[in-house]
């Protein structure tokens, strides 16, 4: 039997990869939920046709009334612009949460607007694909993935506990954090890897000559390493603007690590570096 859903009506703002996947996950585990979606003109049509949502709201404000849960899956800039409108339209019992990749700025803005019973809960699913859009949405996208929640596990608001239980039901693993710590952490484990992949692609492209070498010799290893390079700039622009300091610091650390490797290429230190890297890789593969 499906689990009961504490939120009977859900509004999903942004029906692309993340919002669409969340809608599909709700459909799978809580089939009785009513879901309204909003997105740019025509963009929500695939989500409606795919059964992820029940109806498309004509505009953002029309999606909010009556919703027990509002799930913001918009780009960071669009989410920041929408917060005052959402706060003004949401009912006192509503939980509003976002899925944006950085948290400090959006939580600061939300603090200034959400009053009178409406609760804002910052969130960030550490799940995704290099290709966006509802056509890539998947009900299992969040399974096994960390999902940052900007609160404490002891938060007394029952709406926060209910949302964490939804995440567990769809297979995600809630990780509790404050916004600044979150942005520092994702700068290292998410944003820096993206830019390292972009830099590697640039080096490969620049070094490839008219014969096609070295790219024509590349195997699966390079393809695996460059998977993130398939992600478009439109997805990352707002992230780079909103987490610049943390990303810059992470890139400095990467530069230092590369310099160290360059200095010790033929030294005994490399064995330790490989052992440490193997340990980090193994820890990521262990079930949480």
Image (spheres, rainbow, N blue to C red):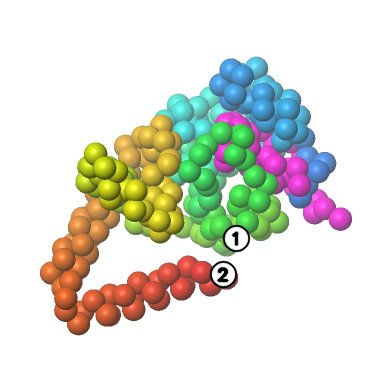
Residue 102 appears in the figure: no
| Residue ID at (70%, 42%) | 24
Q: Which residue lies furthest to the left in this view?
A: 263
Question: Of label 2 and label 1, which has the lower sequence position?
Answer: 1
x and y, in percent, of residue 35 in the image: 73, 34
| Residue 160 appears left or right of 232 | right
Q: What element carries label 2?
A: loop
| Residue ID at (44%, 56%) | 220
Q: Which mark is residue 245?
A: none
Q: Which mark is residue 144?
A: 1
Q: Residue furthest bottom?
A: 268
| Residue ID at (57%, 70%) | 287
Depth check: 191 or 132 in front? 132
Q: Is mark 1 on a helix, strand or loop?
A: loop
Q: Which residue lies furthest to the front in this view?
A: 211
The total of numbered circles placed on residues is 2
| Residue ID at (58%, 17%) | 41
x and y, in percent, of residue 173 in the image: 59, 60
Depth check: 257 or 62 in front? 257
Query: For mark 1, does the 10 Å Cα neighbourhood hold few (<14), some (14 to 19), or many (20 or more) residues?
Result: some
x and y, in percent, of residue 195 in the image: 32, 47
C-alpha gap between disc 2 and disc 1:
8 Å
| Residue 22 appears left or right of 8 | left
User: Bounds of the magenta span?
Assistant: 1-28
Q: In this view, does 263 lie above or below 224?
A: below
In contact (CB < 8 Å): disc 2 and disc 1 = yes
Depth check: 4 or 1 in front? 1
Q: Which residue is the site of mark 2?
A: 288
x and y, in percent, of residue 90 in the image: 62, 30
């Amino acid at each position: 039997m499906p689990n009961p859903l504490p939120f009977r009506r859900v509004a999903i703002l942004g029906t692309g990869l993340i919002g669409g996947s969340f809608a599909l996950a709700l459909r799978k585990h809580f089939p009785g939920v009513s879901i309204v979606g909003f997105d740019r003109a025509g963009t929500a049509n695939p989500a409606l046709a795919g059964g992820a949502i029940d109806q498309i709201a004509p505009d953002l404000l029309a999606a909010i009334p009556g919703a027990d849960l509002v799930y913001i899956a918009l780009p960071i800039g669009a989410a920041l612009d929408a917060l005052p409108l959402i706060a003004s339209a949401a009912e006192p019992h509503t939980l509003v949460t976002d899925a944006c990749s950085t948290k400090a700025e959006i939580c600061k803005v939300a603090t200034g607007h959400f009053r009178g019973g409406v609760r804002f809960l910052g969130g960030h699913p550490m799940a995704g694909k290099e290709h966006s859009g509802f056509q890539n949405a998947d009900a299992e996208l969040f399974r096994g993935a960390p999902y940052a929640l900007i609160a404490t596990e002891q938060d007394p608001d029952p709406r926060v506990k209910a949302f964490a239980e939804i995440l567990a039901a769809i297979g995600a693993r809630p990780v509790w954090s404050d916004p600044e710590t979150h942005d520092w952490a994702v700068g290292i484990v998410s944003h820096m890897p993206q830019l390292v992949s972009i830099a590697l692609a640039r080096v490969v492209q620049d070094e490839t000559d008219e014969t096609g070498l070295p790219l024509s010799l590349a195997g699966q290893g390079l393809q695996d390493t460059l998977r993130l390079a398939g992600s478009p700039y439109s997805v990352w622009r707002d992230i780079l603007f909103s987490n610049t300091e943390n990303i810059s610091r992470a890139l400095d650390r990467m530069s230092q690590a590369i310099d160290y490797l360059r200095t010790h290429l033929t030294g005994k230190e490399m064995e330790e570096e490989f052992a440490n890297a193997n340990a980090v890789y193994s820890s990521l593969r262990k079930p949480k």
